[in-house]
Image (tube, rainbow, N blue to C red):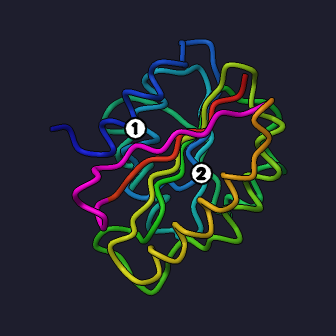
Amino acid sequence: MKKIVDLAHDFLSEVLNETDTAVDFTCGQGFDTCFLAAHCQHVFGFDIQIEAIKLTKQALFERNLSAELILASHAKAADTVDRFKAGIFNLGYLPHGDKAITTQALEVISALDQMLPRLLTGGRIILVLYPGFAHGLAESAEIESYCEKLPAKIYDVTRIQLTNRCQAPYLLLIDKH
């Protein structure tokens, strides 16, 4: 079985082409940013931690890829990004970083509120959720509650989860039609 992030990339590749703009709302170690940069014309990457921006910059350099990296919360993405085809939020904390610094459901929801109208028709946002620790479980529940209320005339929301591993990471796909 593929890792959850590899599945997320597969689902992103279904909607992307080389002329698109994409957003990595949580740069982390740069894996998602690099994936998007290899498949799109322009990529914006956001993170609140300078360490994450440095790791992402190094990962891009090693692969001879480029992206516009912004040291800011994804809740500020609307200040920079006008229209985009795909985006990804890989929530939780920076692996091997300070586990006290985590994504916050209210900031994710704020970013979604601002960015969903900017998502192009046929576009997709993926959220990788981590319910395996207390904060991640609460964050996952809040974000799912928000996504359940998105208007079905505009968006489809799909949940991808291993049903026999309730604490395993899972995906929410938001597709705009």
Above or below 143: residue 155:
above
Residue underneath mark 2: 25
Instruction: Locate residue 22: give its quadrant.
Output: top right
Q: In this rendering, which labeled residue sits more in front, label 2 or label 1?
A: 1
The secondary element bearing badge 1 is classed as helix
Magenta region, residue range:
154-168
* Residue toward you, 105 or 39: 105
To which quarter of the image does residue 160 belong?
Answer: top left
Q: Tell me the distance, in whole angstroms, between the alpha carbons under discs 2 and 1.
A: 14 Å
- Labelled disc at residue 69: none
Please report contact status of discs 2 and 1: CB closer than 8 Å, yes or no: no
- Reply above or below: 138 against 19: below
Q: Check disc 2 and report its element: helix, strand or loop.
A: loop
Which residue is pictured at 35% across the width and 76% down the height?
97
Give the residue at x 48% y 28%.
Answer: 12
User: Is 2 colored magenta in this rendering?
Assistant: no
User: Could you tell whether 138 is left or right of 155 in the image?
Assistant: left
| Lower position in the chain sequence, tag 2 or tag 1 | 1
> What's under tag 1, amino acid-wise?
Ala
Principal secondary structure, stretch drawn in magenta: loop
In front: 76, or 105? 105
Q: Amino acid at mark 2?
A: Phe
x and y, in percent, of residue 167 in the image:
30, 67
